[in-house]
Structure formats: C-alpha cells, structure tokens
C-alpha cells in the first residue's frame, strides 16, 4: 500500500498560508483540503472567500482539494459561477454527500453530468454504505474517486477498514489522529495491499477546534514512510517545515 496523498482538512482564516507552503515544500505528499460552506465562512474550519483566494495565489505546485459542503455542493450542481471560480484553483474536489442538508435536494444524474463536464478536476465522493447506489452511475467516469468517510468530520474512528472498491480510487477518513495514525495505517495497508490510496483527517489535527500545526507535523512525519513520493527527505523536516 502506498499513500498518494496525506490530506489535511480544515485550515481556516487563523492559519498563515506561508506555514502551509513550508510544509508542502518539505512534505510534498501533503494535500491541503479546504472546506467551502459560505454560510459559515470565517468560523473555525471554514475560511472566507478572501482567505481561499489568497491561498490559491500562493500555493502553486501544491496538492489542493476543495470540499464542497451544503450550499456549495448544491451550488456546484446548479452551476453557480462563484463556486466554479473558487474551484478553479484546486485539483481535486470533494463532494460532501453526508455533510449538511443536501439529501433529496439534487438529482444524481445532474451530479454525474457536472463531474463529466469538468474533467480538469478529480471528484471525490464522500462514501457511506447508504450511498453505494451512486457508484454504478460513475462507471466509465475516469475523473472520480471514493472516500470511505463514515465519520463525516466528527472524528470517529471505525473498528475496521474496508478494502478498496474494485474500479474506484479509494481513500480513507474517520477519526485519524497523531496518536492512532500508525496503527490505522498498518490496518489500511493490510486491506489495501498493493493499492495506491490516500488518507484524510480533520478533527485529529485540531486542538480546541483550532488548526494545530504541531499535530500536522506529527501526522506527516508518521505518514511519510507510506507515501509514493520519492522526493521526500526526512532531514528536511526540521529545517523547512514551520515550528
């Protein structure tokens, strides 16, 4: 098992963009995942539009994902130009099917159509067993991936991890933290043997609901030996990543 990305979710207006760039320089496998929920912009975990635009201007060459939540998710399906403009600075777009009040408010066929219309992005489907009916709709759609995420940002660690779904690029999230990451990576490596995957965490890198750079460093150091990034050098950690 190799990690293509270690996705760190939840940087907000309290985070210095320069610190994220320094981590990306020393840990090239990190992916910064930014939550977009306009009704909560400026609150912890949810940056303002101005912060997002500043981040994209100063993060060229970095792995970046945008997580579309609630009204942003529905706005994407409705082809809201503001949402599309904000998405343009990100390679991967996560469609948060289990976060916010979106159930029954969109047509799955329109969702698939929007994904097909935007091949420049890889779209991540936040997946739980009740959403498995969506997956056949993405057969033959190359620019999609699936994230096992029963926790949906609540920081709940599952008792076990499922193997990747055949025909889908799959990642793992749910209660990961510096304290349990090594154990969980070993578990994921067993079920995903021979596969390339990624992990994502949000609550596990926060302290008192603030983005915690010390925890981010611990996570990236632990994940490093599982990554598919040959340019990573352990001796860069102390000198290039923020303290």
Image: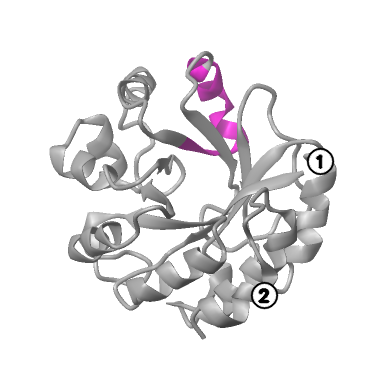
Kindly identify the residue that appears in the image at 19 percent across and 43 percent down.
85
Question: Within the magenta stretch, is there residue 146?
Answer: no
| 227 sits left or right of 91 in the view | right
Q: Nearer the viewer, residue 83 or 74?
A: 83
Q: Earlier in the sequence, mark 2 or mark 1?
A: 1
Q: What is the x, y in percent for residue 163?
A: 76, 36
Q: Residue furthest right?
A: 190
Magenta-highlighted residues: 124-138
Eyeballing the image, is 221 above or below 77?
A: below
User: Could you say whether the residue bearing mark 1 is in a helix, strand or loop?
Assistant: helix
Q: Classify mark 1: residues with Cα within 10 Å, few (<14), some (14-19) or many (20+).
A: some
Residue at mark 1: 191
Residue found farthest to the top = 140
- Residue 227 is left or right of residue 150, and the answer is right
Disc 2 designates what residue? 235
Q: Main secondary structure of the magenta part?
A: helix
Q: Residue at x 54, y 31 (%)?
A: 131
Q: Which numbered mark, 2 or 1, is in the foreground of this view?
A: 2
Q: Residue furthest bottom?
A: 243
Q: Is residue 126 found inside the magenta-colored segment of the image?
A: yes
Indicate the position of residue 60 as horizontal and vertical percent values.
Answer: 34, 55
Q: Nearer the viewer, residue 102 or 200?
A: 200
Residue closer to the observer: 142 or 102: 142
Q: Residue at x 64, y 69 (%)?
A: 219
Query: Is mark 2 in CB contact (under 8 Å) with mark 1?
Result: no
- Specify the quadrant of the image occupied by residue 223: bottom right
């Amino acid at each position: 098992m190799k990690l293509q990305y270690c996705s760190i979710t939840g940087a907000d207006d309290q985070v210095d963009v320069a610190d994220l760039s320094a981590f990306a320089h020393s840990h090239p496998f990190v992916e910064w995942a930014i939550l977009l929920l306009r009704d909560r912009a400026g609150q912890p975990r949810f940056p303002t539009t101005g912060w997002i635009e500043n981040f994209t201007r100063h993060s060229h060459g970095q792995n970046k994902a945008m997580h579309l939540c609630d009204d942003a998710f529905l706005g994407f399906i409705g082809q809201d130009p503001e949402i599309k403009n904000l998405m343009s600075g990100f390679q991967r777009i996560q469609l948060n099917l289990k976060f916010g009040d979106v159930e029954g408010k969109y047509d799955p066929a329109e969702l698939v159509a929007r994904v097909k219309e935007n091949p420049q992005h890889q779209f991540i489907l936040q997946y739980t067993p009740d959403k498995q009916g969506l997956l056949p709709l993405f057969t033959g759609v190359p620019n999609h991936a699936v994230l096992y995420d029963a926790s949906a940002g609540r920081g709940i660690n599952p008792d076990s991890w499922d193997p990747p779904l055949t025909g889908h690029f799959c990642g793992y999230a749910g209660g990961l933290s510096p304290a349990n990451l090594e154990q969980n990576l070993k578990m994921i490596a067993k079920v995903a043997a021979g596969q390339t995957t990624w992990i994502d965490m949000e609550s596990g890198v926060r302290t008192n609901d603030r983005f915690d750079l010390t925890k981010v460093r611990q996570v990236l150091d632990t994940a490093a030996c599982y990554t598919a990034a040959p340019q990573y050098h352990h001796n860069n950690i102390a000198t290039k990543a923020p303290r």
